[in-house]
C-alpha cells in the first residue's frame, strides 16, 4: 500500500512540475507586434447567433474577427489603408477561407473603419495583445 501511495505522489508531483513553464512565452506572445497587409471582409448577417470556432456566438455588433491562425483572444488593430481609421478587434473565429483575404471582421468593426457597401477593404493588421 505504501508503494502505491508513494507512486501516486510521485506521479502527481511530476504532473505539477511538467505543467509549470517558468520563463516560457505563451502562444500569444509569439504573435505580439506581428503585422500583415491585405484584404479584409466582413461576416454576412446570416452568421448571427451561430457558433464561432472558439465556441462563442457570433454577434454582428461586437468588435470581433476571424483569422486563420492567430490564437483566440488575440487583440488586433485593423487599419483601413485608404482613410487611416482603425479599430481593435478580438479574434474568436477561424477564417477567412477565401484566397487573398487576411481577416474577416464583424459588421460593427467593418463599419467603424469603412462602408459595408464596399464589401472589401485594404487593411494593415497588427497584433497588440
Image: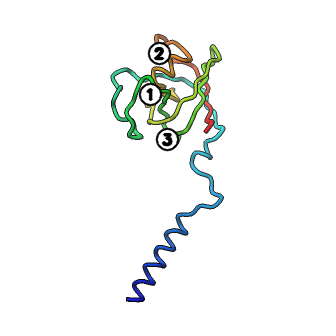
Q: What x and y, as percent, mark residue 9?
A: 46, 78
Mark sitting on residue 119: 2
Quarter of the picture containing the N terminus is: bottom left
Say whether disc 2 or disc 1 marks the residue closer to the N-terminus.
1
Quadrant of res 128:
top right
In three-dimensional space, the C-alpha distance between marks 3 and 2, rounded to whole angstroms, equals 24 Å
**Picture residue at 36% right of the left edge, 20% below the top:** 45
Q: Residues within 10 Å of mark 2 (few under 14, many from 20)?
A: few
Q: What x and y, as percent, mark residue 40?
A: 52, 23
Q: Secondary structure at mark 2?
A: loop
Give the answer, above or below, for where 112 lies relative to 51: above
Mark sitting on residue 98: 1
Front: mark 1 or 3: 3
Q: What x and y, as percent, mark residue 82?
A: 63, 14
Say whether disc 3 or disc 2 marks the residue closer to the N-terminus.
3
The residue pinned by badge 3 equals 72
In three-dimensional space, the C-alpha distance between marks 2 and 1, rounded to whole angstroms, equals 13 Å
Say whether disc 1 or disc 3 marks the residue closer to the N-terminus.
3
Give the answer, above or below, for where 14 lies relative to 36: below
Amino acid at each position: 500500500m505504501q508503494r502505491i501511495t508513494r507512486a501516486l505522489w510521485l506521479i502527481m508531483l511530476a504532473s505539477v512540475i511538467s505543467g509549470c513553464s517558468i520563463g516560457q512565452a505563451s502562444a500569444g506572445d509569439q504573435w505580439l507586434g506581428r503585422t500583415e497587409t491585405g484584404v479584409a471582409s466582413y461576416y454576412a448577417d446570416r452568421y448571427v447567433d451561430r457558433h464561432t470556432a472558439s465556441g462563442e456566438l457570433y454577434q454582428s455588433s461586437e468588435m470581433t474577427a476571424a483569422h486563420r491562425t492567430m490564437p483566440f483572444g488575440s487583440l488586433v488593430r485593423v487599419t483601413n489603408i485608404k482613410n487611416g481609421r482603425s479599430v481593435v478587434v478580438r479574434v474568436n473565429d477561424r477564417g477567412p477561407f477565401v484566397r487573398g483575404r487576411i481577416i474577416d471582421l464583424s459588421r460593427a468593426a467593418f463599419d467603424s473603419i469603412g462602408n459595408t457597401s464596399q464589401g472589401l477593404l485594404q487593411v494593415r493588421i497588427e497584433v497588440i495583445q
